[in-house]
Image (cartoon, helix red, strand yellow):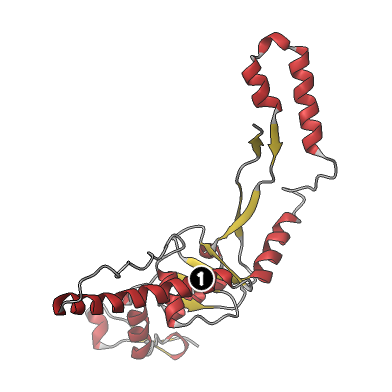
Amino acid sequence: MKTRTMLNGEQNGFIFRCGSEQNRLPNRGTFRNQSETSNRPRVDPKIINLSNRKMDSDEMKVLNKGLKYTPKPPADTDTLSVDIKEFCRKLRLKIILGIKNQRQLTNQLLQKDESIIIKEADKGGALVIMDRIYYRDKIQEQLNDIQYYRELNDNMERKTKRNINKLISKFPHCTTAKEVDYLTKFEVKTSNFYGLPKIHKTKEIETAVQQKNCAYIEINSPKDLKFRTIVAGPQCQLID
């Protein structure tokens, strides 16, 4: 039953309702929590670890520099002077070089670890660390999509070379000797096929980013991760 009560406030443009239509204000803490969440600045992660491997602080410092980071070789200090001023400078240099050598060692350890694979994200430039088995299964899953990929059972290399030779023989005056060499004397090389993780398309990673709100997050093998596949590398090589 709806009840409408006239109060003094109604004269000023306010209407109060009771019973089932009573307007209830939400808890003040709700507004405060929502406000704090919305006002908190978003931190886009630079490193996303999807593997089971835990990264130590030295490895994190190397990964933060990106995949193109190459440690500089240690400087040759054998010819430096032995006076006190030079000794102090060498001492400081030794500390700096020690840090660089440690980073170089950490970088080598990451490169030699065959249990993981590190790729740049499709967008944003974040580094994504994945278990090699997980990455391989995800790429194979996309290759199994017959709508976009199919397996070639015959030898396309020989067939392509035969077709080129037939065309050259059929039109001998259309090409120069240099062009014939370029078209016939080559060795086919298999292209590289790989995928860049689309971290901006997965809800699992996005949820983890919002919850942790830091530059480094860990989430184990998200199921909804997709990849932007890329075919790159030389397809053929000239034979001298």
Examine the rendering and report whether any part of residue 118 can be seen: yes
Residue 169 lies left or right of residue 34; in this view the side is: right
Q: Quadrant of the C terminus?
A: top right
Q: Residue 167: percent from the left, percent from the top? A: 76, 18
Query: At 64% from the left edge and 14% from the top edge, which residue is drawn?
Result: 176
State left or right for residue 90 relative to residue 52: left
Image x and y of residue 214, in percent: 40, 77
Q: Residue at x 63, y 20 (%)?
A: 179
Q: Position of residue 47 (x, y in %)?
A: 46, 71
- Residue 170 vs 57, above or below: the answer is above
* Residue shown at the point (59%, 71%) measured from the top left: 130
Classed neighbour count for the residue bearing mark 1: other residues with Cα under 10 Å, few (<14), some (14–19), many (≥20): few
Between 26 and 152, the one lying in front of the other is 152
The kind of residue tagged 1 is Gln
Q: Residue furthest right?
A: 154
Examine the rendered structure and indicate whether residue 229 appears above or below residue 181. Answer: below
Q: Is residue 210 visible?
A: no
In the picture shown, does residue 94 fall above or below 236?
below
Q: Is residue 54 left or right of residue 10?
A: right
Q: Residue at x 72, y 60 (%)?
A: 140
Please identify the quarter of the rendering in which residue 35 is found.
bottom left
Element marked by disc 1: helix
Residue placed under numbered mark 1 in the picture: 108
**Occupied quadrant, residue 174:** top right
Which one is nearer the viewer's eye here, 103 or 89?
89
